[in-house]
Image: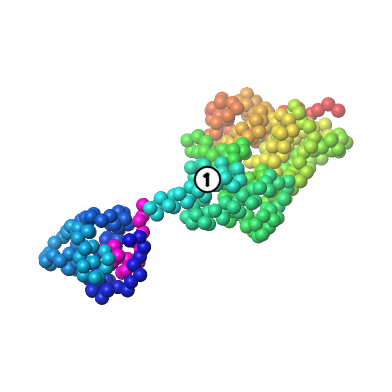
Amino acid sequence: MNGGDSRPPDARLVRLLGAVELAPLRQRLRRHFERHAGRIGSALQLTNLTPGEQDALALLTGRPSRPVRSMRIDIEQLDDSLRAAGIAHSLRSALEILDGPIEHRAALRQARLLEWTRVIGAERWHPTLRLWLQSPVAVALLKRLARSDCVDAEQLLERATRVMRRLPASGITRAQLAADSLGNAHALDNGYPAATLILAALRHEGCPVDLTDVPEENGERQRTPERARDIWARAGVLVNELARPALCLNLPLSAEASMRDSFGDPRYLSLRDLLRRPLTGSFEGTPVHVCENPNIVAIAADELGSRCAPLVCTEGMPAAAQRTLLTQLTHAGARLLYHGDFDWPGLQIANFVMRTWSARPWRFGAVDYQVAVARAPQSVRDLSDAPVVASWDDSLTNVMQDRGLAVAEEAVVAALLEDLASPD
């Protein structure tokens, strides 16, 4: 039979198998049917029997009670005995009367697999979600977020699709996006299932700013995922949009803003500014210098003012606003030239900038390092931590290791100003 037997238990059945101390025996018998679906004629070998289990099985099978540690049971004969005695239709039926329905595990696993396959392969999900669902880790994350419930997983994918159909946005706040799409302004906050799912799919989408380099002790690079705020920014969604704005100098943001008399003073561009009013001017072939430290921008403004070439500062590892600005400049055709500190974190940042935005080194090679050490002996410090390989100059890391000295970007600002100075 396929379902549980709803008849009240026969008193004889309770005496035979219903005792509390026989629960482990009943579980072993149930597992047989869960595995084999109770095929008629199958046999079962039971081992390590307790005295109480030996007595119960002897009564069930009509065998003499004697001390044995194992016993072979013919399921078909036992079914016939139970039916003839009017106790139960079969051994399986008897077990279901006592402890509830027995389900075929293999069939259940197959049914769950088919259901998950249907949910994951549905055509109605957003294309980015569908692409992500093909990755090895996607299904495991989805099951964890949905607590292995197919219905919850389907609802979660529906919510994620509803949000992603509104992307890319043009500077909408995350809270507003959540309220408009899901009816709850906090539904996309960090840690919420829909947000986790969407961020995973966007991260997998293949954007070049997904990963950052982190040095390891052996000098190899490992990669860490892009931060949630940066992923949202890449999709045009604002999270803490006024935090860590991008510092720049003499950057023509549009045709109207390209007047030279408006130049000379550093300015900050928030993520809110950049997403709601992206760059509209053409930078085709225009060199834009990029530095690591804000002091370089301040010195350039003081020394060169409006004569300074376009300059952008990452202020360390670029955050969302800096990444957005550099991406917009690259899309507008700008040629990015990068300089940073001659130390291992500086090389780590440079690797990221050059890989992500195809920047070129700006006085940032092995020869430049040797000149910097010679010209700024009072501004150097000992190198520490694990070395980082410079992707643009294989010899730079070796030279820095040989000298064992770090040089701050400010120590070479005079040379940088020579490049930044443009004719009136």
The location of residue 45, given as percent across then percent down, is 20, 56
Q: Nearer the viewer, residue 331 or 287?
A: 331
Give me the residue at 67% from left, 55% from top.
181
Q: Nearer the viewer, residue 228 or 378?
A: 228
The location of residue 249, given as percent across then percent down, is 78, 37
Give me the residue at 51% from left, 41% from top.
135
What colour scheme does the image use?
A: rainbow
Residue interval drawn in magenta: 91-106
Q: Is residue 109 magenta?
A: no
Residue 66 located left or right of residue 347: left
Q: Residue furthest bottom?
A: 11
What quarter of the picture does the C terminus occupy? top right
In this picture, is 243 found above or below 24?
A: above
The location of residue 408, given as percent across then percent down, is 65, 36
The location of residue 334, given as percent across then percent down, is 73, 31
Pointer 1 residue = 121
SS at mark 1 in the image = loop
Q: Is residue 237 visible?
A: yes
Q: Is residue 102 magenta?
A: yes
The secondary structure that most of the magenta stretch takes on is helix
Q: Nearer the viewer, residue 120 or 206?
A: 120
Q: Which amino acid, by three-letter code, is at mark 1? A: Gly
Give me the residue at 62% from left, 55% from top.
189
Total marks shown come to 1
Q: Nearer the viewer, residue 44 or 47?
A: 44
